[in-house]
Amino acid sequence: AIEWKTTADSPTPGVEVSTRRSDERGNGKGSVARDRTMAEFHDVFSRAKYYDIAFWRDVTDEVTFIQDLYQRKLGRPLRSFLDNACGPGYHARIMAARGVKTYGLDLMPEMIEYARQRAEEDGVSAHWIAADMRTVRLPEPVDFALTSFDSLDCLHTVDEIVDHLTTMAKNLTPRGLYLIEATHLRRSSLSAYGDFFYEGQRNGTKVRIDWATNGPQVDP
């Protein structure tokens, strides 16, 4: 479960005006229109502006690493890229700005629209798709796909992970690479999940998201 608070749009600076709690989980399948539960805490993820304030991070070095990795492995520059579960499109926007044909994919239409708007503000052109990472089919395969920031954990069963990996294979060019970023086990113990928070502030709006407020336990 998570709790999040904002001081957005308050007539009095610093006065909290919005609090939400979500502990919904789901693993059903279906279209984006009717199946929003794959995003574990969709109430937060659908509020893209506040998510961006709390979770923003500079991923410039990560994008450089991806390009260098592909160059070393394939012997040529990276030409196309998929940012899976892209959220506000941090990796996608930088990659597109560097001239790489880029797709940003997220289950949440609200997040995709927000990423599109931020890209337009940056003067960046990318392809934005609201779709399910278990079943999506891109218009054409890409050289490199990325799922970052523990986003693979929205898949809850072995079958869902297999579906996703099969789908990624179909969306990659021959010898294409797929990189999954996940928290190292020494910092994410199943027996002691722990609670933590993310927070940020921008233009008078402050957001704090407290994670694992319900003391989650491992389901054996």
Image (cartoon, helix red, strand yellow):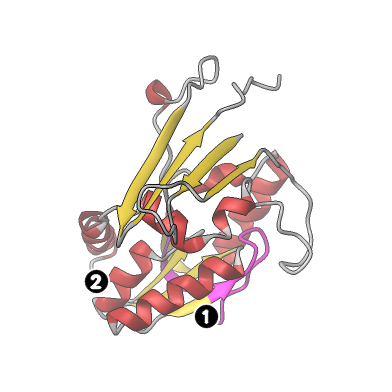
Q: Residue 76 carries which label?
A: 2
In percent of width and height, residue 127 lies at 46, 80
Judge left or right: residue 21 versus residue 179. right
In the image, 211 versus 150, the foreground residue is: 211
In percent of width and height, residue 216 lies at 61, 23
Q: Earlier in the sequence, mark 2 or mark 1?
A: 2
In the image, 139 versus 124, the foreground residue is: 124
> Does dot 2 land on a helix, a strand or a loop?
loop
Q: Does the magenta stretch include residue 138?
A: yes
Judge left or right: residue 175 versus residue 22. left
- Report the amino acid beneath label 1: Glu
Residue at (76, 67) in percent of width and height: 31
- Report the amino acid beneath label 2: Arg
Q: Which mark is residue 140?
A: 1
In percent of width and height, residue 38 lies at 68, 51
Q: In this view, does 45 lie above or below 183?
A: below
Mark 1 nearby-residue class (10 Å; few <14, some 14–19, many ≥20): few
> Does dot 1 land on a helix, a strand or a loop?
loop
Q: Give the range drawn in magenta.
A: 129-147
In percent of width and height, residue 56 lies at 34, 54
Residue at (29, 64) in percent of width and height: 74
Distance of label 2 from label 1 (alpha carbons): 19 Å
Q: In this view, does 101 lie above or below 5?
A: below
Residue 72 seen from this side: no
Q: Residue 22 carries which label?
A: none
